Image (cartoon, rainbow, N blue to C red):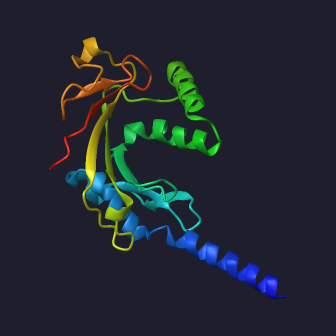
């Protein structure tokens, strides 16, 4: 009987710990919006996590921007906002991860689907904004984030260095460059230098 009581208490304690690691919807929304340009913030759709750790819509949107709250399972903090033109690509990636696909399998499947025209991609570069920070710089209760860094990414399949005039490797702090050139996941990267 004593062992049963201890087991029950441990399960409740573990459950409480798991739930406490997922911030409130309000906190998740506030943090996710750090990655969103100010002009889109009021109408952006926000995806985040319920207390079971499931990805849900925390707030419906009225414009073309979708923001993704921090995944409570990851190390550190990372939130992003992106053009709704990228949602088929992003949501398909999340589906494949949920199915247990490896990163290599996910890339191969999305390439096949993009090339076949069954996975829609933007015809012109579409923006993704990513804000990252250390766990200790995040206040889970308020959603406040300190010492964060932002990265700008523009996706369009099969961009080339010749087409864009961009180098295919980082050249200087903050300088745009083309990652995965001439592939289905080619994207322009802009990472502002860290402030001293």
Toward which corner of the image does residue 158 lie, by quadrant? top left
Check the image and report above or below for 69 versus 13: above
- Residue at the location (63% across, 73% down)? 14
Residue 176 placement, left or right of 8? left
User: Where is 186 relative to 35, above or below?
Assistant: above
Say which of 136 and 56 sits in front. 136
Point out residue 105 in the picture as x, y percentages from the top left corner.
Answer: 60, 29
Q: Nearer the viewer, residue 190 or 66?
A: 190
Asked if residue 133 is positioned above or below residue 112 in the image, the reply reads below
Q: Nearer the viewer, residue 2 or 33?
A: 2
State the image coordinates of residue 147 (x, y, percent, origin top left): 24, 57
- Left or right of 144 on screen, residue 115: right
Residue 65, visible in the rendered structure: no
Q: Quadrant of the N terminus?
A: bottom right
Report the residue at 55% width, 34% height from top: 103
Residue located 54% across and 38% down the image: 92
């Amino acid at each position: 009987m004593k062992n049963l009581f201890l087991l029950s208490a441990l399960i409740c304690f573990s459950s409480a710990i798991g739930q406490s690691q997922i911030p409130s919807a309000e906190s998740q929304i506030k943090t996710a919006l750090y990655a969103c340009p100010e002009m889109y913030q009021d109408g952006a759709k926000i995806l985040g996590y319920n207390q079971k750790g499931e990805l849900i819509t925390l707030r419906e949107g009225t414009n073309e921007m979708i923001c993704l709250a921090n995944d409570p399972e990851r190390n550190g903090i990372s939130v992003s906002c992106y053009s709704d033109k990228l949602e088929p690509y992003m949501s398909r990636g999340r589906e494949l991860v949920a199915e247990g696909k490896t990163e290599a399998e996910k890339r191969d499947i999305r390439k096949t689907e993009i090339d076949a025209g069954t996975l829609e991609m933007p015809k012109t570069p579409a923006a993704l904004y990513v804000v990252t920070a250390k766990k200790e710089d995040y206040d889970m209760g308020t959603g406040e984030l300190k010492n964060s860094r932002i990265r700008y990414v523009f996706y369009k399949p099969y961009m080339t260095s010749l087409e864009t005039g961009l180098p295919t490797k980082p050249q200087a702090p903050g300088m745009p460059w083309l990652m995965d050139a001439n592939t289905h996941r080619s994207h322009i990267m802009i990472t502002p230098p860290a402030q001293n």
